[in-house]
Image: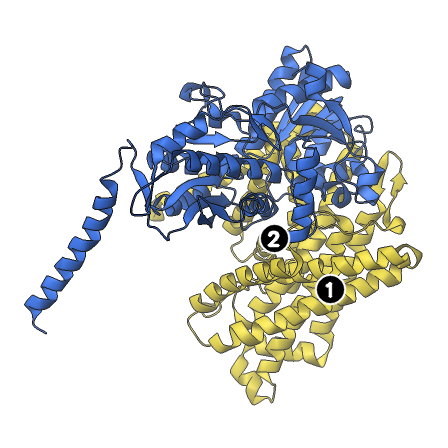
Chain colours: A blue, B yellow
């Protein structure tokens, strides 16, 4: 074969390759471009979850929620198979960035569920936003992610949404619980440097001070620390009424278990954040967990019970975390938005505008999810927040959770009921 | 110590010396400020010291695995943290079963011995397989090759165990006999901390006896000195190396159970990563390749981690002192290496060994 013939063939291939998408995009009037699917192409959904590392149970929890939401539609949307593409976003900004780059490079993906960790969202958001895509996070709570004010530490960009509650809501309500229900006058807050834990600790400390309390210690541990004697000794010097501890497992377990060895903390109450709202947390912490308060999502009702039954049937056992229902709702919001804006052409192809998807998600109002009625907000500092915080409660760990596998623990304070919200 | 005489003045030496002085000054001023403020009582210092000693005992047991392998093969087995995890993670299920039947609290000593034996065997098997399948085929390759293989093996083991046992956290059940405290005046030392220290010390003494007083120990020392001469003396080099990996693995598995009794929480596939790095640091601190050095390095690191943040950093008014615990530990490492590059008890390595 002559060189000229080979060259001609290559050019022809290139021309055909370039011309086909261009032809498909011709029908696209969307500002950000369109996802164009052939007659037999599946609808591809991306997911950025913690697949590896110490907190990969969070990823498993969300993945189960996403899979069950897809299963609930018999695995189809607009009579096409739903394909799920999962990338590991780890629990770091770099992990989120890498996962977002991989997913945004795939032109068939209609939207993304994730990330799990706020730190990963900070890395992923600029890429997803600039690609004209949407990401709906099931378990990010850092207030900075929905705040557009850069001077105030905000990092929100268009295209970011979440079905988990804003840390501002959780932090404020936790501080209210400490002052009003526990009658605490002094508090110590601990974080681990993660935007999630640091943000919550900050909000709790500020709100607690606004409510007339005194913040006697603000400290931090490292992820991976097992020996908490040093920081506990420092806290004992201040003898706070309450320790606010929004840490993840296993640092939260180590902290609470080692408190009993430290003199001066016998009467100090502990309030944990949503990161400790995990079925295995009381059992893994042991006896010391009894009496610990944990703030977490209060998800209940027949539909949720049905989800748990399906989980047991399809995946096995119980969900490993507390945000699977949020992932379920996030998936449904995204798929509903895609279904609402997709346009089928005469040739059987499907054209889905990226901005149209974003607008449709943003227009979500009173969506009856498992985690409550969800309305996605537009204005900072709640831009992209779809949860109202109504599904938040303070739980208290009892012997039943430590020794008898009971989950979730009894509610000690229902924020919606107490605040009328 | 100071090398900046006018005839051979070097800016690098000068900066290192200034750094030395600054670090020592920082430590002294921080400690003085903390101790003179009386913020932390004597009993609290003793408690911190005891907790550090127990944590250090566990580092020391793991560090022995690094040092044994380095001593004999001059390689850093970065998968050793995962060997520790393998024993600890596997044995948590045995501990749960023993707890359910009541055996753990009825016969605590027997149950703990059983757990240590099981964890030791699991870790030993993993270590031997690692040596046989991953490292032996690469013997004689450039030193970077087994090092990279070790890192790969580390990930492989993590995710194999995650596949076997899941990604959730598990915890060792509490042993009633180890609960409670020993009271000495105002000082309360938890019984479990005394147990951990004694158990680790016993295992370390057993290792010392094995290496110094037995034929196989003599063979290990001979292989460590010169493999070719040892081979000429009729020593089966491959077997001795495999035995060394096995011994290091057994100690790591035992450390896993002792760690589980001391800090029952946080058992999962990732649990070996941080202790592995800390134990490696301890081995370098004590003088890698030196058995008593690894023991001392582990204890030293544990104690420094426990008391350092409150003693030095808080005294210097540094916020978030406890989050900088690792900074203290690694600064100590740098400090020791600046003043004594071979580690606390290490011998100066020849060019071929270094």
Q: Quick check: B277 left or right of A10?
A: right
- Whole-percent x, y for residue A330 in the image: 52, 36
Camera-side residue of A261 and A183: A183
Q: Which residue is mark 2?
A: B270
Quadrant housing residue B31: top right
Bin the neighbour count of mark 2 within 10 Å (Cα to Cα): few under 14, some 14-19, many 20 and up.
many
Camera-side residue of A411 and A107: A107
Q: Quick check: B279 left or right of A239?
A: left
- Whole-percent x, y for residue A301 in the image: 70, 33
Tell me, yes or no, whether the two marked residues, 1 and 2, touch with CB atoms within 8 Å: no
* Identity of the residue drawn at 80% across and 40% down: A401
Q: Is residue B234 above or below residue A337?
A: below
Q: If you read the primary sequence from the N terminus, does the residue marked by circle 1 or circle 2 appear first?
A: 1
Q: Is residue B311 above or below residue A375?
A: below
- Whole-percent x, y for residue B301 in the image: 64, 48
Camera-side residue of A388 and A240: A388
Query: Quick one: SS at disc 1?
Result: helix
* Identity of the residue drawn at 76% across and 67% down: B118
Q: Quick check: A222 left or right of A96?
A: right
Q: Quick check: A391 left or right of A240?
A: left
Q: Which residue is mark 1?
A: B119
- Whole-percent x, y for residue B79 in the image: 56, 62
Quadrant housing residue B306: top right
């Amino acid at each position: 074969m002559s060189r000229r013939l080979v060259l001609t063939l290559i050019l022809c291939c290139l021309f055909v390759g370039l011309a086909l998408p261009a032809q498909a995009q011709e029908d696209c009037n969307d500002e950000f471009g369109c996802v164009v699917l052939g007659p037999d192409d599946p609808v591809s959904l991306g997911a950025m979850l913690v697949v590896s590392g110490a907190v990969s149970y969070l990823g498993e929890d969300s993945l189960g929620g996403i899979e069950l939401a897809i299963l609930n539609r018999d695995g189809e949307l607009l009579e096409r198979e739903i394909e799920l593409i999962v990338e590991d976003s780890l629990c770091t900004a770099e992990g989120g960035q890498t996962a977002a780059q991989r997913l945004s490079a795939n032109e068939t993906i209609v939207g993304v569920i994730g990330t799990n960790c706020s730190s990963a969202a900070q890395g992923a958001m600029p890429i997803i936003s600039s690609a004209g895509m949407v990401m709906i996070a099931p378990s990010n709570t850092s207030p900075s992610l929905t705040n557009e004010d850069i001077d105030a530490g905000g990092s929100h960009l268009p295209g970011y949404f979440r079905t988990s509650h804003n840390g501002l809501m959780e932090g404020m309500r936790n501080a209210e619980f400490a002052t009003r229900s526990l009658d605490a006058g002094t508090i110590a807050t601990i974080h681990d440097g993660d935007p999630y834990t640091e943000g919550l600790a900050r909000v709790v400390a500020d709100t607690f001070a606004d409510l007339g309390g005194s913040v006697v210690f603000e400290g931090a541990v490292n992820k991976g620390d097992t020996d908490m004697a040093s920081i506990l000794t420092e806290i004992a010097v201040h003898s706070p009424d309450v320790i606010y501890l929004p840490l993840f497992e296993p640092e939260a377990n180590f902290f609470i278990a080692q408190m009993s060895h430290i003199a001066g903390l016998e009467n100090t109450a502990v309030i944990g954040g949503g990161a400790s709202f995990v079925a295995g947390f009381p059992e893994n912490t042991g006896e010391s967990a009894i009496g610990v308060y944990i703030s977490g999502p209060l998800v209940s009702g027949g539909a949720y019970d049905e989800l748990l039954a399906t989980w047991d049937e399809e995946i096995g056992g119980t969900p490993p975390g507390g945000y699977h229902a949020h992932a379920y709702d996030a998936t449904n919001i995204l798929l509903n938005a895609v279904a609402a804006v997709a346009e089928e052409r005469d040739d059987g192809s499907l054209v889905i505008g990226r901005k149209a998807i974003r607008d449709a998600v943003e227009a979500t109002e009173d969506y009856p999810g498992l985690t409550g009625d969800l309305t996605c907000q537009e204005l900072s500092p709640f831009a992209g927040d779809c949860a109202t915080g109504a599904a938040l409660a303070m739980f208290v760990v009892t012997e039943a959770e430590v020794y008898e596998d009971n989950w979730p623990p009894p509610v000690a304070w229902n924020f919606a009921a107490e605040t009328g919200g | 110590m100071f090398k900046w005489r006018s005839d051979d003045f070097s800016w690098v030496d000068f900066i290192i010396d200034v750094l030395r002085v600054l670090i020592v000054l920082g430590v002294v001023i921080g400690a003085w400020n903390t101790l003179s403020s009386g913020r932390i009582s004597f009993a609290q210092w003793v408690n911190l010291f005891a907790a550090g000693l127990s944590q250090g005992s566990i580092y020391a047991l793991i560090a022995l695995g690094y040092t044994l392998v380095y001593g004999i093969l001059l390689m850093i087995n970065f998968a050793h943290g995962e060997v520790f995890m393998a024993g600890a993670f596997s044995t948590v299920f045995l501990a749960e079963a023993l707890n359910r039947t009541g055996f753990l609290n009825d016969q605590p000593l027997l149950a703990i011995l059983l757990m240590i034996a099981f964890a030791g065997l699991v870790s030993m098997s993993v270590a031997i397989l690692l040596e046989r399948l991953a490292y032996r085929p690469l013997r004689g390759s450039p030193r970077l090759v087994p090092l990279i293989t070790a890192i790969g093996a580390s990930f492989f083991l993590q995710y194999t165990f995650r596949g076997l046992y899941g990604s959730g956290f598990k915890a060792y059940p509490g042993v009633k006999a180890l609960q409670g405290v020993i009271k000495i005046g105002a000082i309360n030392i938890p019984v479990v901390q005394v147990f951990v220290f004694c158990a680790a010390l016993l295992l370390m003494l057993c290792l010392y006896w094995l290496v110094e007083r037995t034929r196989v120990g003599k063979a290990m020392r001979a292989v460590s000195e010169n493999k070719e001469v040892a081979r000429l003396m009729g020593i089966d080099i491959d077997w001795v190396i495999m035995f060394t990996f096995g011994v290091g693995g057994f100690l790591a598995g035992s450390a896993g159970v002792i760690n589980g009794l001391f800090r029952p929480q946080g058992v999962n596939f990732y649990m070996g990563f941080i202790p592995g790095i800390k134990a490696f640091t301890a081995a370098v601190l004590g003088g890698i390749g030196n058995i008593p050095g690894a023991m001392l390095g582990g204890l030293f690191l544990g104690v420094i981690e426990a008391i350092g943040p409150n003693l030095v950093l808080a005294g210097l008014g540094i916020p978030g002192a406890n989050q900088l615990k690792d900074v203290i530990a690694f600064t100590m490492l740098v400090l020791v290496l600046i003043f004594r590059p071979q580690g606390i008890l290490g011998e100066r390595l020849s060019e071929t060994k270094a």
